[in-house]
Image: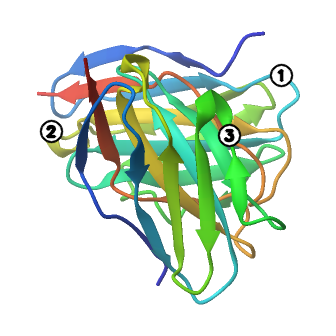
Amino acid sequence: DAGVIQSPRHEVTEMGQEVTLRCKPISGHNSLFWYRQTMMRGLELLIYFNNNVPIDDSGMPEDRFSAKMPNASFSTLKIQPSEPRDSAVYFCASSFRPGPQETQYFGPGTRLLVL
Amino acid sequence: AQSVTQLDSQVPVFEEAPVELRCNYSSSVSVYLFWYVQYPNQGLQLLLKYLSGSTLVKGINGFEAEFNKSQTSFHLRKPSVHISDTAEYFCAVALYNQGGKLIFGQGTELSVKP
């Protein structure tokens, strides 16, 4: 079975450019999460969706970050304009049902480097 | 505020030795507890989780963890490690009243040496 799919796997861009990260959750899963992993801050939740609706975006660092989920099989995380401090590994995860007891299945991540 | 503390950032052990990775949490509300493993250049994978019931939870790859409510701990153990267990291990909590939001510890890097 296909797991969570993320693209691209690696992205190198210059400061000021727009970056779009993509995620395809596991088919049939109804919740989707975006996380960021850095050495300084560890793993932190940016935003999550239930049934394509954003539920909690309190972790989104600032207005330069936006996320959408136009349908059950696709989500994007956009950074515009990008800055060097956005360099991190961005993970997408999905779970079958909404709820704190649910297992989250993680994608392989997108490694972003902003020069 | 809720937080998760993993007491050891790095744990080196020899193959076939036992290991314990320590995790403490702080929360004013009930939580669910998780351990995830991250192999190099991969995403996270669930090892085990505690939701309710028996405080000793068994997971994949021979790992187990014990929930101790009075000490607010959820330590991960394995009686005999293999080289293939070399990875980073994350303890996480989910608050029962905050949807699926996971709060992660800083991670423990387990290095198994031959």
Indicate which disc residue A99 carries: none
Front residue (pair B18, A22): B18
Can residue A10 be seen? Answer: yes
Q: Earlier in the sequence, mark 1 or mark 2?
A: 1
The residue wearing badge 1 is: A27
> Which chain letter matches label 2?
A
Chain for disc number 1: A
Numbered mark located on residue B59 in the image: 3
* Neighbourhood count class around disc 2 (C-alpha, 10 Å): few under 14, some 14–19, many 20 upward: some
Q: Marks 1 and 2, how far apart in space? A: 34 Å
Residue type at numbered disc 1:
Ser
Any mark on residue A84, and which?
2
Determine if residue A56 is in view.
no
- Mark 3, other Cα within 10 Å: few <14 / some 14–19 / many ≥20: some
Q: Chain of mark 3?
A: B
Label 1 CA crowd tier, 10 Å (few <14, some 14–19, many 20+): some
Q: Position of residue B49 (x, y in %)?
A: 69, 52
Q: Nearer the viewer, mark 3 or mark 1?
A: 3
Q: Residue at x 36, y 35 (%)?
A: B17
The residue type indicated by label 2 comes to Pro
Q: Label 3 vs label 1: CA separation?
A: 25 Å
Circle 3 — which element? Answer: loop
Residue in the image at 88% along x and 28% along y: A28
- Colour mapping used in the image: rainbow
Q: Secondary structure at mark 1?
A: loop
Q: Residue at x 30, y 64 (%)?
A: B7
Task: Tell me where residue A45 appears, x and y as whole percent.
Answer: 50, 54
Q: Do the numbered discs 2 and 3 sit on residues whose CB atoms are within 8 Å?
A: no
- Image location of residue B63, percent across then percent down: 58, 40
Q: How far is the residue under mark 2 from the one under mark 3?
A: 39 Å
